[in-house]
Amino acid sequence: RLGAIRSRHLALGLPDPLADMDRVWWALEGHKRRWGKVTRKRPVTINMLRWIFKGLDVEFTLDDSIVWAALMLAFFFLLRASEYVHSDSPSQIKGRGLHGNDLQPLQDGASTKRFKDADEVVLRIRGSKTDQLNLGEFRNHFKAQDATLCVVQALSWVQGLAPERFEEEADLPLCRWSSGELIRREQILSLIHI
């Protein structure tokens, strides 16, 4: 907060309000020593995704397929964790997250039933922290030439192993283990941090 106040003063051409306040700077340094520096979050890279993919059997194992689809959706649609998997955070809004009926496969711009035939996917985000009016929004992504790094192909693998997630269970969270238990944010993070 002090940094923001100082920055605003300097931007407006006003004198530095912390210029002769050595005790403030000492207190901040003491705070860093006691509580440590903030650990920086590292971005997920294409090489990380390729490495994770090598350890998965996405065509024949539902759990691997759904984890890969979750990673592809998160990466290519720039989703926050609360927008696609379950979090134990008390601030998570009930009903938020990705459901089967939030994804629509398209072929040449027309709706189709199967992701296998699709060349595009449209995602409905019900609401997010970045949605100022919290009305939800739609985003689309096209099929990629590289099948391993393609969100459409990832959803096709899930639909091939669990078609019910896009039909009779379409109103339930998509990112569930084969046991029906919700995939948690921490479980996805553990894959990325390996």
Image (cartoon, rainbow, N blue to C red):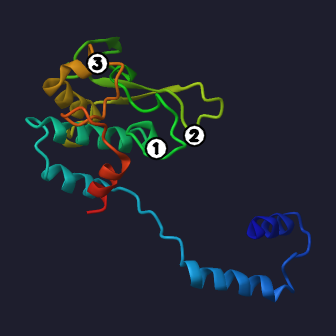
Mark closest to the chain's N terminus, 3 or 1: 1
Task: Find out whether the residues at labels 3 and 2 contact each other: C-beta distance under 8 Å.
Answer: no
Task: Find out whether the residues at labels 2 and 1 contact each other: C-beta distance under 8 Å.
Answer: yes
Gap in Å between the C-alphas at discs 3 and 2? Answer: 26 Å
Q: Is residue 79 visible?
A: no
Q: How many marks?
A: 3
Gap in Å between the C-alphas at discs 2 and 1? Answer: 9 Å
Gap in Å between the C-alphas at discs 3 and 1? Answer: 23 Å
Q: Tell me the amino acid under the disc marked 3.
A: Glu
Q: Tell me the amino acid under the disc marked 1.
A: Arg
Q: Where is residue 117 in the image (x, y as percent from the top left)?
A: 20, 18
Q: Position of residue 182 (x, y in %)?
A: 31, 37
Question: Quadrant location of the N terminus?
Answer: bottom right
The residue indicated by pointer 1 is 80
The tag on residue 129 is 2
Task: Find out whether the residues at labels 3 and 1 contact each other: C-beta distance under 8 Å.
Answer: no
Q: Measured along the vertical axis of the image, is residue 179 above or below residue 8?
A: above
Q: Which residue is drawn at 83% across and 64% down?
A: 11
Query: Which of the pair 184/136 is nearer the observer?
Result: 184
Secondary element type, mark 3: loop
Q: Tell me the amino acid under the disc marked 2.
A: Lys
Q: How crowded is mark 1: few (under 14 residues within 10 Å), some or many (20 or more)?
A: some
Q: Residue at x 30, y 41 (%)?
A: 183
Describe residue 59's horizontal placement relative to residue 91 as left or right.
left
The residue indicated by pointer 3 is 169
Describe residue 143's horizontal placement relative to residue 185 as left or right.
left
Mark closest to the chain's N terminus, 3 or 2: 2
Q: Position of residue 177 (x, y in %)?
A: 23, 37
Q: Residue at x 51, y 40 (%)?
A: 92
Describe residue 67's horizontal placement relative to residue 139 as left or right.
left
Query: Which of the pair 95/122 is nearer the observer?
Result: 95
